[in-house]
Image (tube, rainbow, N blue to C red):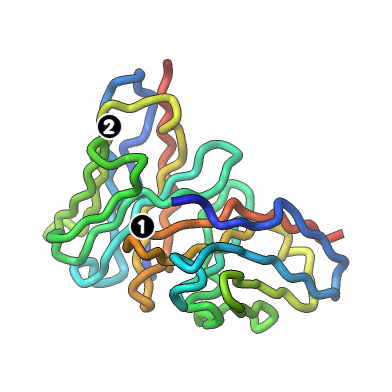
Amino acid sequence: QSALTQPASVSGSPGQSITISCTGTSSDVGGYNYVSWYQQHPGKAPKLMISDVSKRPSGVSNRFSGSKSGNTASLTISGLQAEDEADYYCSSYTSSSTLVFGGGTKLTVL
Amino acid sequence: EVQLVESGGGLVQSGGSLRLSCAASGFTFSIYWMHWVRQAPGKGLVWVSRINSDGSSTSYADSVKGRFTISRDNAKNTLYLQMNSLRAEHTAVYYCARMGEDGVSPDYWGQGTLVTVSS
């Protein structure tokens, strides 16, 4: 199972919005509404930000939103804040009943 | 509060074995499916394995099939990962994670335990 494709890095200024894409195939992202997004700060464990394409767990800021079109899912962060600077990973259920992650995207808040 | 605490990592020679443990608390461990996910130094997350709530069903990434075994002891609220025939490419932080409400993706993660395989 190949990793999902994410941009290596994105950046934005405080207050701006950014979008991170996550591209897979019809056997994973495109075939199921089981895309999740994780935030990971250096040296820390991943934190679930979005599940089921667009559901925000309790306690996650509504500045984070998710969507999907075809084989590509997206995470949008609006009103960028300094503490949003982190690595972000997408994940998807696959047709093999396994889980696959994206390669990760480093978000820099300028 | 959900807590997952991994242990058992360390330095092992190539070809050796390790058993990782993950102690769970703050939730009813016996009804949740669980995952292991690894992260090589400076690299991304890679799914390793998952187990259902009573341990009767398991799934593995192709890269570890036949080499790693996931198991659990619900009486001890503990998840395990037995790793055999280790190679340098298995060097990583290994995280245990609870499967979330969607029945697929991890929601809560432990802090991880580092496994270093020396060649």
- CA–CA distance between discs 1 and 2? 19 Å
Looking at the rendering, in which quadrant would you find the C terminus of chain B?
A: top left
Residue at 66% in and 77% down: A64
Neighbor class of circle 1 (other Cα within 10 Å; few <14, some 14-19, many 20+) is many
For residue B81, side relative to residue A83 (left or right) = left
Outermost front residue: A26
For residue A45, side relative to residue B65 (left or right) = right
For residue A81, side relative to residue B54 (left or right) = right
Q: Under tag 2, what secondary structure?
A: strand
Total numbered circles? 2
Residue that label 1 marks: B4
Q: Residue B58 at what x, y percent from top left?
A: 21, 56
Nearest the camera: A17 or A92?
A92
Q: Is residue A57 above or below residue B20?
A: below
Looking at the rendering, in which quadrant would you find the N terminus of chain B?
A: bottom left
For residue A99, side relative to residue B84 (left or right) = right
Q: Is residue B103 above or below residue B92?
A: below
Q: Residue B30 at what x, y percent from top left?
A: 18, 67
Of badges 1 and 2, the one in the foreground is 2
Disc 1 + disc 2, Cβ < 8 Å: no
Chain identifier of the residue bearing label 1 in the image: B
Q: Which mark is residue B25?
A: none
- Circle 2: residue type: Leu
Nearest the camera: B25 or B103?
B103
- Corner quadrant of residue A49: bottom right
Residue that label 2 marks: B18
Chain identifier of the residue bearing label 2 in the image: B
